[in-house]
Amino acid sequence: MKQKLVKGIHSFQRGFFASHRELYHQLATAGQQPETLFITCSDSRVDPNLITNSAPGELFIVRNVGNVVPNVDLPGGTAAAIQYAVEVLNVENVIVCGHTQCGALKAILDPESVAHLDYVSRWVKSTIDVKKLIEEKYEHLVGEEKLNAAIQENVLAQIEHLRQYSFVADRMDAGKLQVNGWVFDVGRGEVYDYDPDIGEFLSLSRL
């Protein structure tokens, strides 16, 4: 695997970097000016730059298990990155992006499946709080349908968590910061955006 990665670096240097040398020079001298804070899961199948066809420097990416926006009383790297993106980099957009087959939400629905993983268990218990909502609102669903509902509700919950940060809420209320909730369907390559007017996730490919 290491040799594969090294070959990839050589290919990057000879290919993409060589043909985008001016872009990287600008990023190195002028610094980053991303337009969007992209909060997503650590899952290796989710590649924000690839999905959105974004160039280096356009996305400020934050990743953790379950695409979590922690409560304001839980400091850490994610909260620090959010504040830096909003208050220092002045991003104009925030996207919280979940994805199908998310292991974190599977763990929420079936805690015993990760009971032997101490750190995973503690993370999902302390940061993902949609289990009760899923049990009450989606009791009639089973299997993948229930998991997909949990994935969507988790994205919406993280958007609500964002508003707990005063520097986010103030900019949202002033119309200076737009927040969207997405779900990436890994198997289909589709991205669904939450439409608050109708309360549903709609495919962006239709726009």
Image: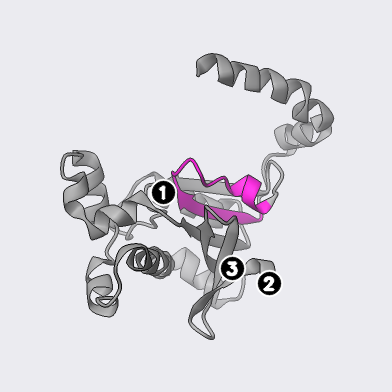
Residue type, numbered disc 3: Leu
Q: Quadrant of the C terminus?
A: bottom right
Q: Residue furthest bottom?
A: 197
Q: Are marks 3 and 1 in contact (CB under 8 Å)?
A: no
Q: Residue at x 67, y 66 (%)?
A: 205
Q: Return the disc, 2 or 1, that comes first in the chain's sequence.
A: 1
- Closer mark to the observer between disc 2 and disc 3: 2
Q: Is residue 30 left or right of residue 101?
A: right
For label 1, the residue is: 78
Q: Is residue 179 visible?
A: no
Q: Which residue is mark 2?
A: 206
Residue beneath the point at 69% across and 48% down: 54
- The x and y percentages for residue 6 are 60, 16
Label 3 belongs to which residue?
Answer: 177
Q: Is residue 142 magenta?
A: no
Q: How many neighbours does mark 2 have within 10 angstroms: few (below 14), some (14-19), or many (20 or more)?
A: few
Q: Amino acid at mark 1?
A: Thr
Residue 120: x %, y % from top left:
25, 43
- Spatial CA span between label 2 and label 3: 24 Å
Of callouts 3 and 1, which one flags the residue occurring earlier in the amino acid sequence?
A: 1
Task: Say which element carries label 1.
Answer: helix
What is the CA distance from the residue labelled 3 to the residue labelled 1?
A: 18 Å
Q: Is residue 169 visible?
A: yes
Nearer the viewer's eye, disc 2 or disc 1?
2
Viewer-closest of 166 and 195: 195
